Structures are given as structure tokens and as C-alpha cells.
Image (cartoon, coloured by chain):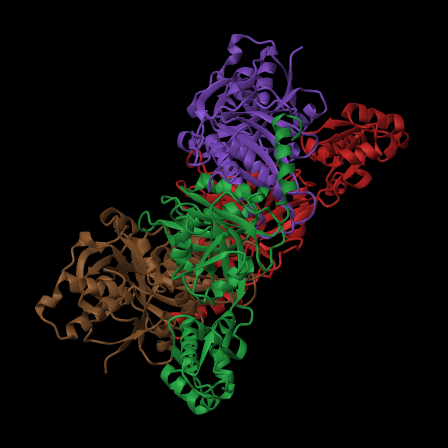
Chain colours: A green, B brown, C purple, D red
């Protein structure tokens, strides 16, 4: 039986693009969910082996919810991260020219990411809000399908006919995820539409604990760390546990702890793998300091960019220091 | 002319509940938006004077997007924060008994917040996913309206008729925000449905800069702080600028800076008002340290819970220290 | 053969008082040295098994020199610390009354420690500088001895005769260490002379490495830690290695490293014993961070006052944290 | 009337060499004192306008005492620092050859600084302890003077006569400060005797407050800072006040505060001048944090080696940050 992967559907989303970096359509059962919470819960409830969800900078939303949902409830770990460029296709009617586009359906998140491009290339176009990145694609596809299904001749595909479709839809083009173009049988009037060509969304593959991928030398570890209530400067103190072991953080987000007003918990991505001595020592320190530390996975960093190791934090440095302290304790050196 | 307030609509959302803490329905023009981004942009584009958006722990999503949208683009500041309890009504048909509920429409975020309540009170009910917190309320209302509009006698409101409505809808109750009950003319089968009675969503009122509310003694300041790229330990160093002035942070979230991979910016809520000496000194320190600090408003804390001031951080302490250094510089004391 | 103890002589010094806390006059060979350096070097050169030297707040000087001499050269460790109250006897002639004292011989350090007492009790007395704490005692004793040796009758011990002695000496009383009174056969006109009744000098017993006393639960560890040159904030970073393990420092002194201008080394006393997990982890961290860490002994704290252990820093906390990380690495928990 | 300078005498000490960097013998009244405490007190009591005392790494001792004496009692400030190389002359009889030296009088501190040189150049010489760096010079001079005063012929200055002098003295050469050679009319058998050619002693000129020298761009400020008792991590917190203003420390020494056991005070040299914005801000922070901060002078660094200013800590950076916060407070920027 194929493994089941829950993801934020429908087909054609950026999340599906992330899922496709992990499995092909024929090598897994892909289960679209209406929401990231239900995708994650599907794994907890045994309806899927894995879930793919956005964890940072998403144009599909839900990042905060993902963090909170992963951090509470039965344990899940992150097994892999995947980066997907934030880049849209402008989908339109087959016969349409880019210059003629006037009304662009787009989810406001998508519109915000492409505003400058639109302003530069289609200064006379305006925004028709859509309720999701794929909603406009689906509406387009439905309209075309209805037209195709109707008895008509080739002459029917005239500009006049198309214009009628557009009038019923209320827009003549849509910003959609690249994968949605083919999926919905649309025509791309422009591709690579994005104001920031370097923007990416970070997705993760989550599954049950007990299957940490091996260290690669460029890994991340995700942790949830609760702060002790009673200590002033507790956040600084927590960060010092990473700093003294030379560990760089790539993400930190405070979350209300749920325990009491003014109590905080932090969702953290730290460079390094639980198999690395520096990460293990930092986690040992955090375990002593924090009322609750939750390990949420060590996995390879996507996209490279691992920081160079700080002097004195290689596994060999830890081994040498342990050997020294043992010798001092035996009275053999000072 | 009434001030215009953009918010995440439609009517009946938790965001509308936050908006109602600020203005009544008759004292302002309230403009529902499809998305938080477009609500915020409405202020930037002059279509509204203010926007109300969730900024933490929302069951309506978009928190990350709100932070990013506020932090980029033309300046906006936070003028006020409002807390709204995360508590739902279970809306049903007028004739229905709670015990008979079997299929509950709910957005997955809402479902996740009420799972234990449902399990305890309606163990045989199951989840029908809805696309938003108000979508099920609207569908319910439409179905009832259609039924009401149809020619019928009182006898038509029999259980059999209701059952037909339910069958067409696909659910027989819905978890909806409390305000949606009256707005959509629904019947509350249960109120105060929530697993964590203390959970709240934090909303903010945003507007153009230049109108900071006066300090109250229990205020917050929101800042966006970019880290210099080249310094190891830059996050610790940034936090020390707050710590040395005795300032407690209530929220911190790293955001990709958009400038380059591995460059970070932080969205921060800090206790204190820009009119307080300790906050001004901390911001002076951050301005020296950071390539970009953006002030995003000082405003009263909602819900109380301000930390006691650390010794040596009252305005009078700063004044005394300045007076001392001036006297030392003049050679009058040591 | 009796163990040999080198100390800052001659007999009667505060250092001898410290030595007497360790050994009695008959159970050891006590070797007075002219200077702390030569006392320490006597151990290095095999002329003594141990040395007793002041390490903090001495009225006999040389503390800085002790630190530097211990930190350089062949390894020595501290085996024990001893506190000696900074309290003097005012020694005079047998027949003299306290009120009549006018000229007090005292080393300037001693004078500085007793100035207020003298002002209060002997407002008309003035200071005759002496070159050491025992020099005046010895001069007194010599003068008395010469007088005793001279052929004379009891009548010779008249005030007139005494006055003659005093005139030759140039002083009529002396501030001396309490032990010097008996040793030099003097008469104490007053005892417990001190402005600060709580002032103590801290002495240590040093010897060759390899003989660390067992942990008592209230111990100190002395370390010499060199800073890496190239790192800004290196001092803060060093201290964080102690702080993250909950270790309190009781003494820190920067010393020019001798390697290059602007390079520093630190002499540190830290609470805890090398057998304690927290101390071992801190030293492991320092060893990774520093170009040179030198262990200079773990030994019981004299005088009590050990800080309460910070939460999360007991040996059991370290053991629990190590067990947790091992279980996480095996995939058995999160 | 000439200004009076108190210093650790007698003539010929390293301290006199430091004094000579400040004033010539004819432009001031130089008052030799038996001890650093009495030299400092001479200024407090109006017997001298200034004192010159060693403050770091001295071969004449008393550094700890200097710090404690300056930090307590009526205010004094440091006006200047002077570096004196730790380098000795080997003084002998006029007729003596270096190779023939066998017994070298030296204070143990001096001997410790020259041990390797002696071992290399005079392997058969041994140490005759002297009680100070100038005591042997004075003894030498006295012996020669007595010889010169005695009725004798040139023939009397034969090796045999000299040998007699040496026998009475107990040594045939002495390690003395370079200035002592001429002062005592000795003959230098070797000059520049030192194991570490870079070793220097740091001296300071102290006087009454109210006369801070102007900033030069390479200055130091000396402070005495007491720690609040009740705060864990207080030392780290104190250092953060310097670090957040980019200030480098060149010396730090913990001193028992004298107030209570376990309470500490720190003697600190920090780079920068009280006229610099960064130093003033750090001192303002310390004043808020500490129960007692005592300013002990800003003065030019001797010997250069000022650290490059950290980015964001120039006066202009402080001015820009203050201008920004003022504009934010007026609502003119964010």
C-alpha cells in the first residue's frame, strides 16, 4: 500500500509543489485537506503517514497555526524541509493578449507579492479579490469547461464569446501557482510573476517520531522551549544556551504558552543535528533550564546556507574538552 | 463623514467583535475585506482611515501575513490592541436539540479549539470542514431563508422539513463566532464552546503614523528590527539592548528580512511606551545597532498584566543618572 | 620527616596565623620567606612541600604577585583556603598606659585599616611609618632585650628608663599582628584594633597537582582563563559559560596575558568543585572557547556563604538531561 | 611654590621613573613615601597636590592596595597613566667583571622577572634576597661611601679591598631599577636585564577631582562599580552595560565590597572618555543598575593600542539616534 500524504489542497497549490519534491503522483496517495490543521491531525489520527505544511513565509497562510498545532498534541517530528519559490503564473484565456488584461483575480496575499510587477507590466489592471490561490483557477476552468461543453463551432471562440465568459467571471486573468496552470488546463500569459525573485516559502514534511534522518553536516533542529515563569531575563538566558555552544538560530517565534497569561513558549529552528555534540549539549542545557522542551526533529537544511562552524564547536573540540576534564579529575593535568 | 474601518469580514467574524470594541455600528463606516492584506492596504491607499487585524494567536489566520504587511510598505502604526476570547457558539436549527447534533460544520481552526468540548458533550458528532468561521453560518442562514421564502404553512416547519434542509446542507450544526448567531439569525444550541477558557486572540487597530496615544503606565511598543548581517551573536546583542534598560518582551518573531538569505528581521512587542525614558534609550541603542529599526506604535496593553518595573528603570532613575553624569562632567562629583 | 611549609615571614605575620590553621609548630617544618614569590618558588624547586600565601585583600601585600606567580611556571594547585581576621594588637611597653600613647609605629597598610579606631581612642597619637607589620615589633623587642641585657636594677624599669627606650626607638607603641605579641614578648595595650570588624584576608595553601580534596558541597574552584584575541565581547562570552551552568563567581581579576599587548587572561574563583557536573560542564565549555585554561584547584570554601544552587544545576538535573537526550537520540521520546 | 608629588620612595625606584615622565626634579617638590597608601593619603590630607602610584603589574607591589585605597575615602581621580619598562640594571663594584658575579642581591619580585636572564648569562650566580628594589643599591652605596670616607690611598681600591667590601655586604652585585645606578653612584655591569622585554608596569598620577584632561580619542576611564546584592547574574548584567555601548574593558578586578560577605565591587578600566557619548551612556546605565558607581578619572591611554570603535558607537551615531527618537516622538517618522 502506498504511503498517504496529507496536504493543503486542492491540487495546484504551492503546498502541492512542495509535496511533489518529496513524492511523485504515482508513488504515494496524496490527500488534499481544507486546512493545515486537518492535514496535521490526519497524521495524528492515523489517516495519513505524513503531512506537508508550510512553516515559514507562506502565501497560503496558516504558518502560525502550523507551529501551534505541531507543538501541542501527540508528538510529531519534522523529517525534511522543502523550499518553493514564491512565483506566480498569470493565467488567462487562450486567445487573450497580456496587454489587454484589465481585471486580475488574485488572493490578496498573491496580489501583495506581485503588486510591483503588475504596476510595471499592466499599469491599467486592477485587483479582483479571490478567496484562495486556486479559487480563481478553478472558476476559470469551470467557465471554460462550460463553454467547451456547450454546442458551438470554432467561430464561437471569437473574442466576443470570450468576452462574455469574462463578463460572467468578473475577471479576465488570474494570479495562480505555477502548478495550477496545467492542472486546470489554463493558459499562462506570463510566468515567473513575483516582485521579489528570491522569495521562497518553507514547507516541512512531518511524521511520527522515531525516524530522525542522519546528520549531513548542514542540518537544522526544531525545538519548542517553554520559559520558566519566575526568572527575569529568561529569554536571554535561553539564547545563551545556544550561544555558548556556537549554535546559530534561523528562526524564533514566541507563542503564548497556553498555561497562563504572560507565560511564553518559543518555537525555534537551530542550525545543527541532534547527533552533533554542540546540539546535544545545548539541548541538555535547555532541559535543565526549561519546564518543557520538545524535540521536533533534526533534518537537512534545504537551500544550503549553513553558517560556518564557530571555532571550538566541532565534535572533536567537545571530545578534547571531555578528555581534558577527565584527566584533570584524575589529577593528571591542570 | 464617519471614519472608515477596514476589517476581515464578512460580518460576524471574531475580527468584527474586535472592531466593535473600538466603534459601534452607527459611529463608523465598517468595510469588510476578504483578507487581512487588503484590509491593511485599504488604509495605505486612503480607502479607510483605520484597519482592525489579528496580530497573535488567531483562529482566523493571517497573523504572519499581518506582521509582514505592516512591516513593509508605507508606514502604519498600531494605535490600540483588543483581546477577543476564543469561544464559539454551536448554532443549529430552531427546533433542534443539542443531543441530536451529529454533523458539525466548522473551520478546522475552530474545530481544533473545541475538540475536547465536542468529545465530552457530543461524542457521536463528527466534523464537516468549512472554509471559514462564517461560511457555515452563511450557508445555514441561506438555507433557512430559502425555506422561509418558499410558500409554506407552519406545518412545514416540522422535523421532517428541517431534516430536508440539513440533508441539503450536509451538516446539522455549526461552530460559529458568537456575533454570527444574531447576525445570521441562527439559534445557539450552546454558547461558550472552547477547550481553553483563557484563550484569546489579540487584534490591533492600525492607522497612519503621527497619532501615538498617551502613555498610561501599562503600554506596549511594537518594533521591527533588522539584524546586522556580519555579527555573530547579533540576536543576543539585540536583546541586550532591551535587557539593559529593564524592558520585558511579550512577543518576538523572526521574519526573513527579504534582503538576503540568512538575513533576519524581528517583529517585537516590548513593554513600555516611547514616551518612557527606558524605551527611548533602548530604541536609541537599537538604532545604533541595527541597519533598520521601524517604530510601529506605542499603545495601551489590553488585558493588563504589565510586568513590575525593574529597579533602576523608572523615568526618575534615568533623570537622576543623567544629572549625575552632567555633574561628573562638570567636575562637581565623582 | 616533617612536611615543609614555606610562608611569608618572619614569625608573627598574618601569614603565620594562616599557616597555624593548617599545621601546628611541632607537626611541620615552617620556612619563613622574605617574599611571596620565593615562598611559592620554594615548592616548585622542591625546597618545601607546601606554601601558604595571601590571595585576596591582604594587609601584607603581594596578592597580585601571588596570582601571577601561581598562574605561570610549573603547575601548582590550591588545596585549601584560610581566612584570617584583619585585626591588630597595639603593642607597647609593660608599664605604659594606653592613654599616654603618642607615636604609633605601623606599616601604612595597617595604619589605613585602623585609622578610625586610633582617631576615636587615641586622638592625639600620630603615625610613625614602619616597613612591615613585624618590623616595629622586632625593633621593640630588640630595644627591650638590650635594656634587659644591660646591668641594671629593678629601679631601672622606671618611667624615666622606659622613656629613654622610646626616645631611641622613635615610637611608643606599634600596631602588630596578634601573633606577634607573644612571639616578640610584647605587651598588648589594646587588642582587636580594626576599623572594619568583618575584614578578613584570604590565604591559600598551595602544593603540587594531583591531590584535589573531595567535594564537600561548599567548594570553590580557581581557574586561569585566557581570552581568545580576535573575538569582540570575549569577556561576556567567557562569563556566559559559567552563567549557563548556574555557577557564581566570587573573584575575577584581569591580568595582562604576557603574550601580547591587549591580550588578557583572567584569574577566577568560581563556586563549585571539579567533581560537580556543573563545574565540569563549564570547564568543558571554557576549554573549547579559550586558548588556555589552567585548573588551579578545587577546595572547600572557608567561612561558608556558598550561594544556593540555582534550579536545574544539581548533578541530578544534569543526569536527567543526559538521559533525555540519549532517549531522544534513540527516537524513544521528544 | 612648586607642586608637591608624593611617590613610593626612596629615590631610584621604578615609581620615581614614572614620576619623572610627569615632572623634572627641578619643576616639582618630590616627596618619597614608605608605602603607596601613605603616598595617596598625602594628597587626601593636603600634604601633596599629586601622587604617583603603580596600578598594574608592578614589581614594586601594592597594586591591590592602591586600588582599594583610591576607591575608599575622599574622592581622588586619575589624571594620567605612565608606563615604565620592567627592566633592571645589574649594579656592581667599579672593578668587577660581569663573569665574576656570584651573589646577586635582589628583591624576590625582581629576581622572578630576571631569572632566565641570570640563568643564561650568570649560571653560577645565586640569589641573595633583598627587602626592596633599592635596599641593595643603598647598601652598596653605603659600603662604598664608608670605604671612600676612610683614610686610604689609591692602592686601597685593590681587588682585595673590594673583596672585603663584598664580604661584609654578603653580595657582589644587585638587580636595581635603572635610575638607581646614577642615583647611588653605582656601576652598571649589565643593563636591560629582563626576561620579558615587553613587560611594563602601569603607573598613574592621581589628584583631587575636578580636573579631567580633555578627550584625545584614545582614552581610558577608571570606575569603581558595586554590584547589587540581590540579583543573580549581576556581573553579566553589569558587563552588558558596557557591551551594548561598544565599550571594551582593559582591566577588571573584583574587590570584596567591605559592606557584607559575598557583596562585591569591581575596579574597572574601560576604553573611552567621559566626554564620549558611549561612555556617558554606559555610566548612566551603571548608575541606574548599581548601588554605587564611583568615577575615578578619564585620561589618555599610555602606550596606544586603543581598540577600533565598534560600528554604531561614534558620537555621531548617538546624535543620529537621539534625533531619530525625537522625530518619532513628534510623530514625524517611524
Return the x and y of residue C275 as percentages of the image width and height.
55, 28
Could you tell me if residue C123 is visible in this image?
A: no
Could you tell me if residue C46 is visible in this image?
A: yes
Return the x and y of residue A334 as percentages of the image width and height.
65, 31
* Rendered-image quadrant of the C terminus of chain D: bottom left
Return the x and y of residue D69 as percentages of the image width and height.
51, 40
Return the x and y of residue D290 as percentages of the image width and height.
42, 47
Q: Nearer the viewer, residue C174 or A121?
A: A121
Q: Nearer the viewer, residue A320 or C101?
A: A320
Looking at the image, residue C89 sits to the left or right of residue C11; the answer is: left
Looking at the image, residue A195 sits to the left or right of residue B282; the answer is: right
Q: Quadrant of residue A63?
A: bottom left
Q: Quadrant of residue D55?
A: top right
Q: Quadrant of residue B2?
A: bottom left
In the displayed structure, would residue A136 be above or below residue C260? below
Q: Residue at x 61, y 35 (%)?
A: A322
In the displayed structure, would residue D19 be above or below residue A118? above
In the displayed structure, would residue B210 be above or below residue A206? below
Q: Residue at x 36, y 71 (%)?
A: B35
Q: Nearer the viewer, residue A120 or D314?
A: A120
Looking at the image, residue C132 sits to the left or right of residue C74; the answer is: left
- Judged from this view, the residue extending furthest toward the front is A151
Q: Nearer the viewer, residue B151 or C14?
A: B151
Looking at the image, residue A91 sits to the left or right of residue A259; the answer is: right
Amino acid at each position: 500500500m502506498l504511503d498517504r500524504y496529507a496536504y493543503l489542497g486542492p491540487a495546484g497549490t504551492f503546498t502541492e509543489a512542495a509535496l511533489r519534491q518529496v513524492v511523485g503522483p504515482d508513488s504515494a496517495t496524496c490527500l488534499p485537506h481544507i486546512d493545515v490543521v486537518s492535514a496535521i491531525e490526519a497524521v495524528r489520527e492515523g489517516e495519513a503517514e505524513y503531512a506537508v505544511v508550510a512553516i515559514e513565509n507562506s502565501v497560503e497562510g496558516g504558518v502560525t497555526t502550523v507551529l501551534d498545532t505541531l507543538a501541542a498534541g501527540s508528538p510529531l517530528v519534522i523529517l525534511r524541509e522543502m523550499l518553493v519559490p514564491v512565483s506566480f503564473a498569470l493565467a488567462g484565456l487562450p486567445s487573450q493578449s497580456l496587454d489587454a488584461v484589465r481585471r486580475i483575480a488574485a488572493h490578496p496575499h498573491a496580489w501583495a507579492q506581485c503588486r510591483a510587477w503588475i504596476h510595471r507590466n499592466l499599469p491599467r489592471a486592477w485587483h479582483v479579490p479571490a478567496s484562495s490561490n486556486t479559487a480563481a483557477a478553478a472558476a476559470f476552468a469551470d467557465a471554460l469547461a462550460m463553454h467547451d461543453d456547450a454546442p458551438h463551432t470554432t467561430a464561437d471562440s471569437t473574442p466576443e464569446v470570450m468576452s462574455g465568459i469574462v463578463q460572467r467571471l468578473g475577471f479576465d486573468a488570474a494570479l495562480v501557482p505555477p502548478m495550477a496552470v496545467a492542472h486546470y488546463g489554463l493558459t499562462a500569459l506570463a510566468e515567473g510573476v513575483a516582485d521579489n525573485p528570491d522569495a521562497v516559502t518553507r514547507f516541512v514534511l512531518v511524521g511520527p517520531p522515531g525516524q530522525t534522518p542522519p546528520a549531513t553536516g548542514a542540518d537544522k533542529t526544531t525545538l519548542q522551549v517553554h520559559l520558566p515563569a519566575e526568572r527575569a531575563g529568561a529569554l536571554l538566558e535561553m539564547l545563551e544556551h545556544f550561544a555558548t555552544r556556537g549554535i546559530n538560530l534561523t528562526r524564533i517565534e514566541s507563542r503564548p504558552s497556553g498555561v497562563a497569561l504572560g507565560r511564553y513558549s518559543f518555537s525555534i529552528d537551530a542550525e545543527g543535528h541532534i547527533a552533533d555534540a554542540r546540539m546535544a549539549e545545548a539541548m541538555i542545557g535547555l532541559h535543565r533550564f526549561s519546564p518543557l522542551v520538545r524535540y521536533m526533529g533534526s533534518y537537512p537544511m534545504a537551500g544550503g546556507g549553513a553558517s560556518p562552524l564557530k571555532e571550538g564547536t566541532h565534535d572533536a573540540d567537545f571530545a578534547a574538552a571531555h578528555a581534558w576534564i577527565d584527566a584533570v579529575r584524575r589529577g593528571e593535568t591542570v
